[in-house]
């Protein structure tokens, strides 16, 4: 049996968040978002990542989960992964100013790191003389 989805099934799943299929109330997701943000503020990034993945699975169309997940990944130095989360959020909210600003900031940091890594190493002005 093939696991391929029909185009109509794909369209339905893309347009319908899991929260709607399972009857998860927005208030429940709001509570999870509040806890995720508190954990972020406390620096408990692995837990935040898990919660953000769950929130994104429950409602893949809501930008906030992608934003917090990206911020968490950025704090951990995972810039490429953070950028990927922002791009996912921008699919659903292409003009969201927070997502766009975060993407710009991360791209600037990546560009600086890339330039620094590519910069030639200059010799030291006072090399040590072996005796």
Image (spheres, rainbow, N blue to C red):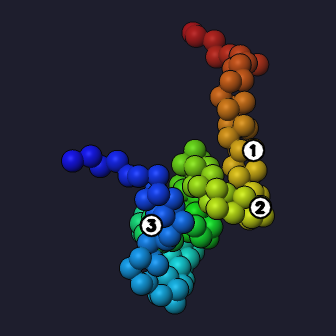
Q: How far separated are the C-alphas under marks 1 and 2?
A: 19 Å
Q: Quadrant of the C terminus?
A: top right
Answer whether residue 51 is visible to the viewer in this image: no
Q: Report helix, strand or loop for mark 2.
A: loop
Give the label, 1 or 2, closer to the camera: 2
Q: Report helix, strand or loop for mark 3.
A: helix
Mark 1 or mark 3: name the one nearer the start of the chain.
3
Quadrant hosting residue 107: top right
Residue in front for this viewpoint, 89 or 49:
89
Circle 3 crowding by C-alpha within 10 Å: few under 14, some 14–19, many from 20: some
Q: Report helix, strand or loop for mark 1.
A: helix
Give the label, 1 or 3, closer to the camera: 3
* Left or right of 57, for residue 121: right
Provide the residue designation for mark 1: 108
Q: Where is residue 129 in the image (x, y as percent from the top left)?
A: 63, 12
Quadrant hosting residue 102: bottom right
Provide the residue designation for mark 2: 95
Mark 1 and 3 residues: CB-CB less than 8 Å, in contact? no
Asked if residue 28 is positioned above or below residue 11 in the image, the reply reads below
Q: How far separated are the C-alphas under marks 1 and 3?
A: 29 Å
- Residue drawn at x 52%, y 86% as measured from the top left: 26
Q: Position of residue 58 (x, y in %)?
A: 45, 72
Mark 1 or mark 2: name the one nearer the start of the chain.
2
- Residue drawn at x 50%, y 70% as measured from the top left: 16
Provide the residue designation for mark 3: 57
Circle 2 crowding by C-alpha within 10 Å: few under 14, some 14–19, many from 20: few
Residue in front for this viewpoint, 104 or 120:
104
Residue lying farthest to the left in this orientation: 1
- Residue drawn at x 76%, y 50% as measured from the top left: 104
Asked if residue 53 is positioned above or below residue 80 in the image, the reply reads below
Residue in front for this viewpoint, 13 or 70:
13
């Amino acid at each position: 049996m093939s696991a391929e989805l029909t185009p109509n099934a794909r369209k339905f799943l893309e347009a319908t968040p899991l929260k709607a299929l399972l009857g998860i109330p927005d208030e429940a997701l709001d509570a999870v978002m509040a806890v995720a943000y508190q954990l972020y503020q406390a620096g408990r990034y692995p837990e935040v990542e898990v919660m953000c993945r769950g929130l994104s699975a429950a409602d893949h169309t809501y930008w906030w989960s992608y934003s917090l997940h990206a911020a968490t990944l950025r704090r951990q130095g995972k810039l490429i992964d953070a950028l990927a989360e922002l791009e996912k959020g921008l699919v659903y909210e292409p003009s969201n100013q927070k997502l766009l600003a975060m993407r710009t900031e991360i791209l600037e940091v990546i560009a600086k790191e890339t330039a620094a890594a590519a910069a030639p190493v200059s010799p030291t002005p006072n090399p040590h003389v072996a005796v």
